[in-house]
Image: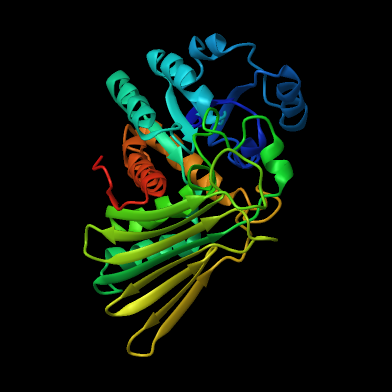
Amino acid sequence: MNDLPLARLAVIGLGMATKPHLEALAELKGRVAVTGVFNRTRDKAEAVRDTYGFAVFDSLEAIATDPGTDGVIIATPPNQRAEIVARMAAAGKHILMEKPVERSLAAAQDIVAQCEDAGVTLGIVFQHRLRKGALRLSELVGAGALGDLALVRAEIPWWRDQGYYDVPGRGTLERDGGGVLISQAIHVLDLMLSLTGPVRSVQALTGTTRLHRMETEDFTAAGLEFASGALGSVVATTATYPGEVERLILDGTEATAALTGGQLRVTWRDGRSEELGESAGTGGGADPMAFPCDWHRDLIEDFANAIAQGVPPRIPGREALRVHALIDAMVRSGATGRRVPVEAV
């Protein structure tokens, strides 16, 4: 019997987004080994060591040169990714990275190409795809159960108070690359594209409401034309107090599927209906991390399996470029007031 873990991973970056990763890794003990954690502020790393028992790395170089580390989970702000990815890819370390890939489409493409050239696996954390309702909806779409897709509606009415944006760099182009689209709505938009296929063109309105003082947008409304011929809409904001659950609705010729948070309801034209999923929060309110670690656990385990078996992870880096291209088009359309095409990636 082989008692070795599927993969041995280090964690780089210990900010707010790391909490579900650490909890998931604790649950995966025996399946995935944690070789250590690293943070530029050592106090945070030591606090994680004291809570979870994970070792602390003194530097990125120590991780890159550690023969016992197969890969890394990167959960730093987006503006720190390029340097870390370059070092880890050159050292042959596989990479599972928090969204977004980078701050712009071009920078994201550079990271994906760099990992491909180095022959290392790159996975992106889009955990919304791992919810039970989302998995079932993917099965139904794949089987053609909804019929031909006609209309798509994505609604992300989330809330962040001003204190959230008062954190240095948050909601800025320099650190995050944008506002609600690239930091919050990206999860639902990625899930949408995984179900609908690519968007051909976008007409968008973007702006900042009087509820926030920030550099980038806290509101976006957009009309979409999909490559399939379906039409759609997106409304995304962090200015809806106290925050509501996001919804993704697919209207087909045979049925309508509504995914509200993690709960799916399908209504067929012949009168049948189906409901399933979980009612857990998804981080749409004042606490961005108010959701369980289950989806991260499944995503990390999938990544570990991909490393062990030499196969692509569930959400590879190149696939994540699709949502970057859509966000890029929405931002350009909002800036110009014109309908713009979505770049094929």
Residue farthest along the bottom direction in this orientation: 271
- Quadrant into which the C terminus falls: top left
Residue 257 x/y as whole percent: 40, 73
At horizontal 38% and vertical 48% (from top left) the residue drawn is 330
Tell me: residue 264, above or below residue 12.
Answer: below
Q: Residue at x 41, y 50 (%)?
A: 190
305 relative to 296 in the view: left or right: left
Picture layout, residue 278 above or below residue 81:
below
Where is residue 282 drawn, in percent x and y?
Answer: 60, 56
In the displayed structure, 45 sits above or below 283; it is: above
- How many labels, in total? 0
| Quarter location, residue 170 | top right
Q: Which one is in front, 300 or 90?
A: 90
Q: Is residue 44 visible?
A: yes
Residue 327 position, x and y percent, is 40, 45
Q: Nearer the viewer, residue 202 or 56?
A: 202
Q: Is residue 166 left or right of residue 319?
A: right
